[in-house]
Amino acid sequence: MSDPEPSRMNHEDTEEQTNQKEVKEQRQELNEGEEEHSDFRTQRLKTKKVHMCSHSADCSKLEDCKQHQKTHNDVRDHVCCECGKSFNTAGNLTQHQKVHTGEKPHKCSYCGKSFTQSGHLKIHERIHTGEKPFHCTQCGKSFRCKTGLSRHLLIHSGVKPFTCVQCGKDFQLSSKLKEHMQIHTNVRPYACSLCEKCFVRLDHCKRHQKTHSSKKDHVCCDCGKSFTRADTLQQHQRIHTGEKPYKCSYCDKTFTLSGSLKTHERVHTGEKPYYCPPCEKSFRYLKSLQNHLKKCHTSSQ
């Protein structure tokens, strides 16, 4: 039984937004493809005549060098006749035009899913093969694509350039700040199709929907309780083992769940991320906000 697709509560993405998102992913994938094959290029250059880019790079052919230099000059003379978007190479334009034609010539040999670009297919197939070729040199964690590694490295750098204007919390990614802001506005656009529960994030909604499934094939060997997901079983088993791997960085208290630690640390930081717009009051816990809304604002809604 496949998981039902969650519905959007407020609005659906327009076709233009969907196209823009795919184009953004395509451009990102093109950049990743360039970096991923840099080692191969370097080896090839040892045996071929080299044309030096006046800015930075070596190219094995003069035509390649000319095309590469356009990336520095930002010359975008290849224009899409459908939407007017311009590109610096004909290849990038060709890739983009598949957004309009709907062409997806690259098919996964494992599940049949199709993609507009071979690079997208290559990354997707790593889900099936388990391949994670991008490794963090600081902690050893591996990733399927270079973008995942780049985002992960922000954790080690400690840089958090995106700040919430409501509570002052900092984030490493703009997308995480956007998700966080929905806590303050109480916007939960992803609704479970089987109950009335709503979520800020799509992945949380999908995860919740699995709880409606009758299939609970992850069984605790200590008490026989069954779960729909392996990680939920793993968390449950800490009740039996007494394991509390999450330690507060401000005091010596420990917790079985990372979420419990996160909530506890707000006592030390003073963070109150749950915001009531009508009265501009903030709360440390979601339950406190929900109780406040029921008590003070039910009649006015």
Image (spheres, rainbow, N blue to C red):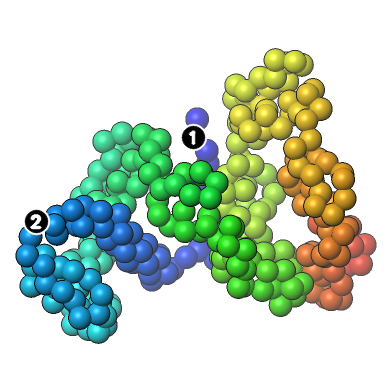
The residue that mark 2 highlights is: 47
Q: Quadrant of residue 158?
A: bottom right
- Is residue 229 visible in the rendered image? The answer is yes
Residue at position x 61%, y 55% in the image: 201
Count of numbered labels shown in the rendering: 2
Q: Characterize the local packing of mark 1: few (<14), some (14-19) or many (20 or more) Cα atoms within 10 angstroms.
A: few
Residue closer to the observer: 111 or 245: 245
> Residue 84 placed where, x, y %?
26, 81
Horizontal side, residue 229 vs residue 166: left or right: left
Task: Find the distance from the CA under tag 2 to the CA under tag 1.
Answer: 53 Å
Q: Is residue 217 above or below residue 252?
A: above
Residue type indicated by callout 1? Ser
Of helix, strand and loop, which one carries label 2?
loop
Q: Which residue is mark 1?
A: 2
Answer few, some or many: residues within 10 Å of disc 2's Cα (few below 14, many 20 plus, some between 14 and 19): few
The C terminus lies in quadrant: bottom right
Q: Nearer the viewer, mark 2 or mark 1?
A: 2
Residue 94 in the image: state x and y as whole percent. 18, 66
In the rendered image of this protein, does residue 222 appear above or below residue 207? above
Pick whichever, 43 or 284, lies toward us: 43
Q: Position of residue 12 (x, y in %)?
A: 50, 63
Q: Is residue 104 visible?
A: no
Q: Residue at x 73, y 25 (%)?
A: 237
